[in-house]
Each structure stands twice: as C-alpha cells, then as structure tokens.
Amino acid sequence: MNMTPGGNLPVPNQTLIVRIQSGAPVDVSAFRLYASGKVNGDSDMVFYGQTASDDRTVIYATAGNSTSFTVDLTRLRPDVEKIAFTATCDGQQTIANLQRLSIQVDANNEVVANGNVDINGRPEAALILGELYRRNGSWKFRFIAQGFNGGLKPLAEHFGVDIADSTPTPTPAPKPAPTPAPSSVNLSKVSLTKEKPAISLTKKDDFGKIRINLDWHRESKSGGSGLLGGLFGGNKGIDLDIGAFVELQGGHKSVIQALGNGFGDFNRMPYVELQGDDRTGDVAGGEWIFVNGREWKNIKQVLIFAFIYEGVPNWSKTDGVVTIHVPEQPPIETRLTDGNNGRGMCAIARLVNENGSIKVERLNEFFKGHRDMDNAYGWGFRWTAGSK
C-alpha cells in the first residue's frame, strides 16, 4: 500500500523486513524507543557501526543503496514502544541529492506498506522516515518523512544516544582511575576507494573476533520474475559466495570457501572460518567470515574474494559491499563498484600483518575464475573442478 506522510496502518505481529532504498548513498539507522520517546542505552541504536541490537530483535544489513532491518516484533521487550527509522546524508549532501528515497515494510515476502519520499528541493541532511509503534497491544507503521536539521550525530542525540567525541583532547596529568563511564556509540566509518585504497590499524596483542561480511542486493539474491530475476537467470537467482586465501607466518596456505566444504576453523589453524553458506538469499545479513584476532601474530595475510557460483556474472546489478568489523575500530567497507561483467570472481580486499598491525587494502580486481586470480597474486594452489 502506498502511503502519504502522516498515514498509518496495522502490521502483523511477527518478523518484518523494513527496507530503505535510495538513488545515492545514504546512512540509515533504527532506534528502539521507550515511553520517554528516547533510547534506554546505546545498544538501542542499530546502524552501520552496530549492526544488531543487544537481543538481536533488530538486525541491520546493507548492499549498495539498499538497507534492510529485520525486526522481530514477537521478541521485543514489552517496554519498547516504537522503532524509528532514519536516513542521513554524508558531508554537504542533502536529501534532494538522493534522486529517490523510499521505505517499505515486508511481511511473508509481501509488501504491506510503502512510502515514497518527495525529495525535490529538500534542504535537510536527515529525515525521520517512519516508525513501527504499539497501539492497544497491536503494532502499526507510520510513514513520517519529517526533515531534521543536522546529520547523524544530532539525530542520534535527539533520540538520547550518547555519541563518542571524535575530536582528540590533550592528555591530562595522571590521576587516580575514576569509575568507568558508560561506553558511547562511535559514528565513524571508513570507506576504501580508488583514491583511498588502504588503512592501517594500530598494533595490538589481541584484535578479538574480526568479522568480515559480504552482502548484496536483496532482489539479486532472491531472484524473481521481474527485471532483476531476468538478469540473473529467471527464478533461480544468483548465488554470490565469499571466500578467503589464508597464509600463516610459517608458510602454510589454505583456501576458505563453501566450494569443496573448506569452511576452515576459528580456534585452530588456519584461524579463519566461513560461517555457513547462504545459497537461498534468505539470510538477512549475507555471508560472514570470522578471523581469530587473538592469533593475528600467526597470520601473515588474508585475501578476501567473492565469486558468482550460480547466475549470470553481472556485478553491476549486485550492489555488493564487504564490511570488515574489528572490535573497537570503525567499520571498514569497500564496494564492488568496478565489476567486469562476464568475469565471475572478484579479489575484494586483503588483510596484511605488518609487524603486528593490520593493513587493510582494497583490491577490487576481477577474474574469470580461481586459477586466474591465484596466478595474479601468486598463491600457487592446484585447482580442480568442484561443487557444493
């Protein structure tokens, strides 16, 4: 149902998918709100830097210019009264620069609510798009499309989120350690591009669990009978897989991928593990690889790649994005923007051990297959045809 701003309608009390789509990059967030109209804590904000609420009732996923939130209404705490969804522009951009902007609610793979924002001439850098809210024990969705002055930081603070100050401050003279203050949300993120292809993280003894996510356009994952379904082979859809080449300090090399059931191991060599294989497109968050940051001293490099296992190689329609989450660091993302259609494999990024630090390099190079990519980077594996 197409809605006008201010309109509302009932939604089923179940797991819903809230999708926000735009014609240009925009940062999208969700806020769990209580009777005060504000969050109770920083874990109530879900966005690119914190992709799930503490109880995982709200989960964020993004691919290209499409962002989705999986919201399990049945498991929300009873004191949660609303979930607000917002969009904010980077830099000096305004909503008018987005070309298009919409929010929709899906239940059981059907659209139950849809709102298209009139962006013409809008000078704001942020919008409150809509909200799910309780009313007399039931849930409703309201399309809002209300402008908000400022960017993500003032918008988050409006909802009561404590934002970390990114401005360095002088180091004070040593004093007795005070009671630790509550942690604050860090809104920073790093995008690797042609102009800025690498970043180095400070050396640590333990980097914790490093999580690497591959996500892509929902419609291209699920296929369908429309335009995207035709591009990717009818109803069968596309199977886009993530994998990794891993080299340890002693020279041992491994391939981590679902093809051939090479899922790896997080706690033992090679300290890198693929978390399942999303062949259906039903997994909201895409595919994940975990790297054991406690063992980073034993890892020389990890090369992250993706390949199209099924479907027509058409990278320009996947809107693929890889995000690297290192504890206590801003998320690092790189987008598969320069795809060579017809070549089904992409070397995405490389994590290199530089004297104990992590250097993350954007690669974004495309190949016909595993053997060609191996030859280009000199790994020296022996390749045979495989299946999964």
Image (tube, helix red, strand yellow):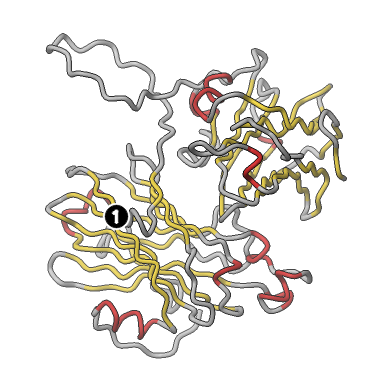
Q: Which residue: 40% across, 44% down?
A: 331
| Residue pointed to by mark 1 | 198
Q: Which residue: 39% across, 65% down?
A: 348
Give the amino acid at mark 1. Answer: Ala
Residue 172 position in % (x across, y down): 17, 13
Residue 218 position in % (x across, y down): 64, 59
Q: Residue furthest bottom?
A: 384
157 to the left or right of 385:
right
Image quarter for residue 319? bottom right
31 to the left or right of 256:
right
Residue 341 position in % (x across, y down): 53, 78
Image quarter for residue 87? top right
Give the secondary structure at mark 1: strand
112 to the left or right of 124:
right
- Compared with residue 212, is residue 253 higher up or lower down, i.e. above or below? below
Q: Which residue: 47% across, 59% down?
A: 335
Q: Which residue: 43% across, 74% down?
A: 261
- Compared with residue 260, is residue 288 higher up or lower down, i.e. above or below? above
Pick the residue in front: 138 or 317.
317
